[in-house]
Amino acid sequence: MVDRDTSRAAPAQGGSPVPSERTGAVRGGRLPAAQLGARGGAGWLLGACMHLVGLFPLLRWVVLGLTDGLTANPPLFLTWSSGDWALILLLIVLAVTPIRRLTGWNALLRHRRKLGLYAFFYTVLHVIAWAVWDRDGVPAAMWMDLWQRTFIGIGALAVLCLIPLALTSTHGWMRRLGRWWMRLHWLIYPSAVLSIWHFFWMRAGKNDYLEPRLSAWILAALLGIRLLWWLRKAGQRRRVDGPH
Ligand code: HEM
């Protein structure tokens, strides 16, 4: 799962049939080496930290489970908690490019895919929790719920946007799809918007909007900064091209 920043990559020269792992040359264009997961000296340490971030919710549930901390209603707690962490990790994925551009910490880019897969992992757990605990694992009841409760339908749309991103997250798919891979991965934006909409709608019944509002502000800031950069780049390009 990526965002558009990497689309500045130059087109491939000569259409090499066997793409290079180092340069990331692909049939339809070129992906930066960082995007393909090239490793540097102390990259493993950052990689380990990213795994720690991704595994933290799971470890937390284990600790809470062992210490009787899963509240009086563990199924509901785990359904909520998996949804919360799926969204938090999705927002962290979207924060990678702005942080990288503001700090120059390019190594971060290599680990974005990992975080994206963790976000998907918690989304899958969240959906399984709903299917098993909320709908008793009955397909007809799940199908009805998708249509009867609007926030469930919206959540399902968010998941539908995430599935192709997870399926095409391998190096093989990156090379095969070339530039289309980056375009496909723009689906992360509608997915994030739909996830927050799902969150708002779910909380509407409880009239408790604090966390949905907070996540909406974070998403707005992350998308706003990209829009600003995009507008600045478009302005620069117009100045270079000059009047026609
Ligand atoms: C088929 C897709 C989905 C289904 C069936 C689903 C189902 C649910 C259910 C049953 C709840 C609890 C509702 C309640 O207690 O009244 C919930 C809450 C939530 N879901 Fe989903 N969801 C889906 C997709 C997503 C996605 C893609 C995300 C984010 C990436 C997400 C994030 C959340 C969040 C943040 C909450 C609120 C948790 C809280 O209140 O702390 N959901 N969802």
Image: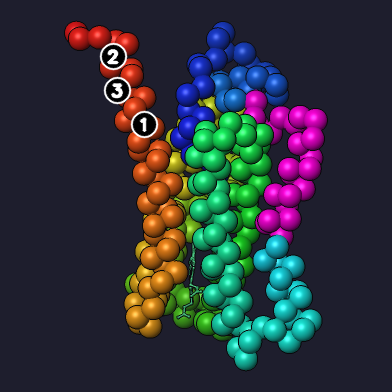
Q: Position of residue 116 (x, y in %)?
A: 59, 49
Rendered image: mark on residue 235: 3
- Asked if the magenta segment contains residue 32, the reply would be no
Q: Quadrant of residue 119?
A: bottom right
Split into 4 quadrants, where in the image is the C terminus? Answer: top left
Q: Residue at x 54, y 27 (%)?
A: 178
Mark 1 vs 3: CB contact within 8 A: no
The residue under label 1 is which amino acid type? Trp
Mark with earlier residue (1, 3): 1
Q: Position of residue 174 (x, y in %)?
A: 59, 33
Q: Position of residue 134 (x, y in %)?
A: 53, 82
Residue named by callout 2? 239
Q: Residue at x 63, y 23 (%)?
A: 24
Q: Residue at x 75, y 74 (%)?
A: 62
Q: Examine the rendered structure and indicate whether residue 60 appears above or below residue 176.
A: below
Q: Residues within 10 Å of mark 3 (few under 14, many from 20)?
A: few
Rendered image: mark on residue 11: none
Q: Examine the rendered structure and indicate whether residue 209 appears above or below residue 69.
A: above
Magenta-drawn segment: 33-55
The residue under label 3 is which amino acid type? Gly
Q: Nearer the viewer, residue 68 or 101?
A: 101
The residue under label 2 is which amino acid type? Arg
What is the tally of numbered marks visible in this picture?
3
Query: Mark 2 to mark 1: distance in Å?
Result: 14 Å
Task: Identify the residue at the far front of this view.
Answer: 103
Mark 2 vs 3: CB contact within 8 A: yes
Residue named by callout 1? 230
Q: Is residue 46 visible?
A: yes
Q: Nearer the viewer, residue 195 or 44?
A: 44
Q: Position of residue 111 (x, y in %)?
A: 66, 41
SS for callout 1: helix
Q: Is mark 2 within 8 Å of ligand 1?
A: no
